[in-house]
Image (cartoon, rainbow, N blue to C red):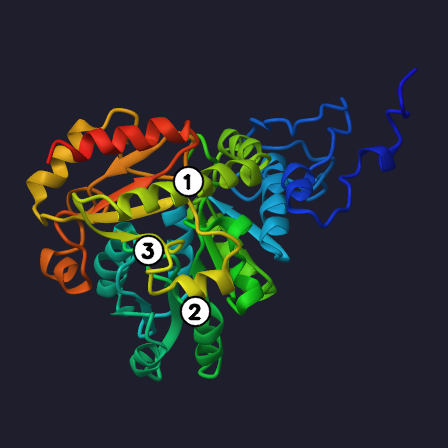
Amino acid sequence: MPDSSPHDDAALEAPEADGFGTRAVHAGQQPDPSTGAVMTPIYQTSTYAQAAPGEHKGHEYSRVSNPTRTALEGNLASLEGAEHGIAFSSGVAGIDAIVKSLRPGDHVVATDDLYGGTYRLLREVFEPLNIQTSFVDMSDPDAVTDAFTEDTALLWVETPTNPLMRLVDIEALAERAHAHDITVAVDNTFATPYLQQPLAHGADLVLHSATKYLGGHSDLILGAVCTNSDEWAEKLRFQIKSTGAAPGPMDCFLTLRGTKTLHLRMEQHCSSARRLAQMLNAHDKVGHVRYPGLPSHPGHALAQKQMSDYGGMISFELADDEMDKALAVLDAAEVFTLAESLGGVESLIEHPASMTHASIPAEEREKIGLTDSLIRLSVGVESFGDLRDDLDRALSRV
């Protein structure tokens, strides 16, 4: 005999729960009301039947909304402690929608060592449209305030930053920005909502490249913005409807699959990264390790205040700061795969100056401290001993 009637709606509701792991598994979802399927179906459809013009069951056209996407958006909003989750076709599409909601003549203040794709978008796409950006070191709150003008409309924050792993005090900068009626957006891709929740520290918008840790398996492209602002949610949904930056239902389904294990994966990412950072910090071939979990990191105390752990990303420079030696390390690695992106179950190694941050001019990279020997690691969930031995072997080649 079944546990409940197939028409018992109460039995199909997602449970209310406070625990992150429980919300990761259940939030935004319920067993399919028509079949009882536990996993949210992939609604692979472009359009929806209407009983009469304008009379529908909540969805009209999948560029505007889709049931699989709606489930994902509810899930991500819950994890970030937000009222609204808005899914995009990529993380960059989410950034584009935020900045596109500004007006010509508006001004943006952004982290100076941010993701190369964000730099390219702000500098090469929006500056010709008369939305100017000032790039500043946000570890100095006074420098941020000094960069504000009467036209500043958006403060764009990464923390930890990509790839230099600097920490930014979200609460301190949000307080200063809000005093000038400036919107605060935080790219939370590196930390994930499991380790850091920017809205709780005063941010207005939280951006994710869900391609990374949220999806977690390097098999999808998707972005998301979470917010408590009804006005911003309306603006961003309008952008999707008008410009077509909507994710497909398969990518939404895969992201939902990924968030269910986010808390479990992040524990392993953090554990192995912490131990690898300690190993690298003591290695004679390594000059400088950038990982907020090290007491020597200048943002270590802030990380303890703002994050629940230190993440799975590490960057480091060689003792001999030469590009050819960095490339030799990349070539010698075997367990670490040479590839762009991050946050998947597999460990990745890359060279920012020639890969993810090549769009930043060399003089700008030099100014912010992005050296030619800098190597970035995305620590996966493989056995720690294999990761340690692989890096040790690779470093022995230089």
* 82 relative to 76, above or below: below
Residue 86 shows in the view: yes
Which is more foreground, mark 3 or mark 1?
3
Q: Earlier in the sequence, mark 3 or mark 1?
A: 3
Q: CA distance from mark 2 to mark 1?
A: 23 Å
Circle 1 crowding by C-alpha within 10 Å: few under 14, some 14–19, many from 20 = many
Crowd around label 2: few <14 · some 14–19 · many ≥20 (10 Å): many
Numbered circle sitting on residue 212: 1
Q: Residue at x 51, y 66 (%)?
A: 203
Asked whether, in this view, residue 166 is left or right of residue 350, the answer is right
Of labels 2 and 1, the one closer to you: 2
Q: Amino acid at mark 1?
A: Lys
> Helix or strand or loop: what does disc 3 sit on?
loop
Q: Amino acid at mark 3?
A: Met
262 left or right of 217 in image: right
Residue 388 horizontal/vertical position (percent): 32, 33
Residue visible at 15% across and 32% down? Answer: 396
- What amino acid is found at the position of numbered circle 2 in the picture? Asp
Question: Are discs 3 and 1 less than 8 Å apart at CB?
Answer: no
Task: Kindly give the residue lying farthest to the right in the view shown.
Answer: 1
Residue on which the image places disc 3: 165
Chain-order first, disc 2 or disc 1: 2
Residue located beneath label 2 in the image: 169
Cα–Cα gap, marks 3 and 1 = 16 Å
Secondary element at image label 1 = loop
Disc 2 is placed on an element classified as: loop
Q: Disc 3 vs disc 2: Cβ atoms closer than 8 Å?
A: no
Q: Position of residue 387 (x, y in %)?
A: 33, 30
